[in-house]
Amino acid sequence: MLRTTLSRAKCAAAWSSTSRSVFASSTKRRMKRAMNKPADAIPFTIDGVRTGVRLCLPFVPGYFLFGAAVGALAAQKGLTFAEALLMNAIVCAAASQMVALEMWRADWTWLHVLAVGGVAAMVNLRFVLSGASLRPWLSPVRAGFVYPALGVLTDGAWAASIRYNAEGGRDFGVLAGSSVFLWLTWITAGVPGYLLGALVSNPRAFGLDLLIVFAFTATLVPILKRTRQFMPFAVSGLVALAVSFLTPGYWFVAAGAIAGALAAAFRNPKAAP
Amino acid sequence: MTDIAGHLHNGHLYAIAAMAFVTLLLRLGGYWLIGRVPLTTRLRRGLEALPVAIFAASVVPLAIKGGPAGWIAAPVVAAVMFLSGKEILALATGVAAASLARGMGL
């Protein structure tokens, strides 16, 4: 597995260049680009894909549990099996599907379609931020590779990939592998729920409603260990907590994350790292 | 596509398509946008802290709102992960701690 110890600052500096050196299709183009920007090279290896899948495994139980819940809800609300799977495949965002299915209807007008789209946008706003956070790492990779992977990005794949990157890894295969693997996991996870209804009758009793929180926590620890960004962590956590009590819905994720990032951006440059 | 009262045929499909479309825009939009603004030191610092900030904003409120089981189990997961570095072990310990707490009526 190829790992470099480039500092984040160096990655970020390389990112502003316009070169997309890695995946040039012809040798000629590859040579030309390699001469221009050799430092930009982001590898894409099978090893990376394997690493991506391995780092995602902690999220699989949670995905199956939420998949069962969403599948059961879809069946209740009168979606056909094909529609339920289609939704898992092309929306692929658990919380927004759950909220949308709660307001699902038998007959639709354009206004209702618009409302469901708006709700999905609100719940999924966090993807704007997770996408932005991947830019310093993936900027040299050709758009034709990055955007398809981003199109099936889920929280688990983002978390696993950003952890790998925080630990110094740069292989694009990790993002591609984890995104596609968890996307397929999510599609599969809807099947038992739809067919059998609520598989786990009382998930709360076993703490299973917290599975995603646990998987996030377990992924966060190595990142904090390495980056020591305790100040943005505290600011973001406190702001998100306050917003979660003050407003309904999912605004708290975006509010907290932006507050934490701003705090880091505007802190006193003389203070530690 | 619609009848006189404005009801859509295949309304389910339109709703799914609308959700998929906006979600796709968001998934691609942040990455696209941040590549088109100049990279100042401030922006770089903010971007570097963004992953940790997103984690904190997701985990802290959900763990607190999970009740006492969340307050106990989330730190347990963090501690096991810190000491062992094994995700699955941390996850299993967290579920055990949470179900224990809920079983005790917390």
Image (cartoon, coloured by chain):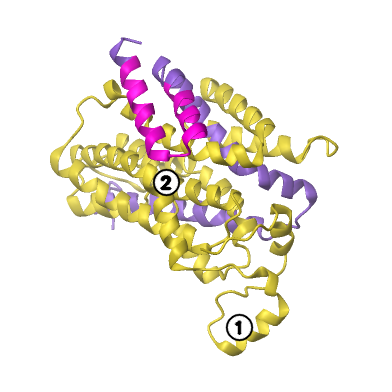
User: SS for tag 2?
Assistant: helix
Q: Which chain is purple?
A: B
Q: Which chain is yellow?
A: A
For the question of whether residue A167 can be seen, the reply is: yes
| Horizontal side, residue A157 vs residue A246: left or right | left
Q: Residue at x 66, y 69 (%)?
A: A40
Q: Which mark is residue A117?
A: 2
Q: In the rendered view, does B102 fall on the left or right side of A1?
A: left
Name the front one of labels 1 and 2: 1
Q: Mark 1 belongs to which subunit?
A: A
Image coordinates for residue A98, horizontal then vertical, percent: 33, 37
User: Looking at numbered disc 2 in the image, what kind of residue is underneath it?
Assistant: Gly
- Contact check, label 1 and label 2, Cβ < 8 Å: no
User: In the figure, is residue A254 to the left or right of A214?
Assistant: right
| Start-end of magenta stretch | B73-101
Q: Position of residue A194 (x, y in %)?
A: 18, 43
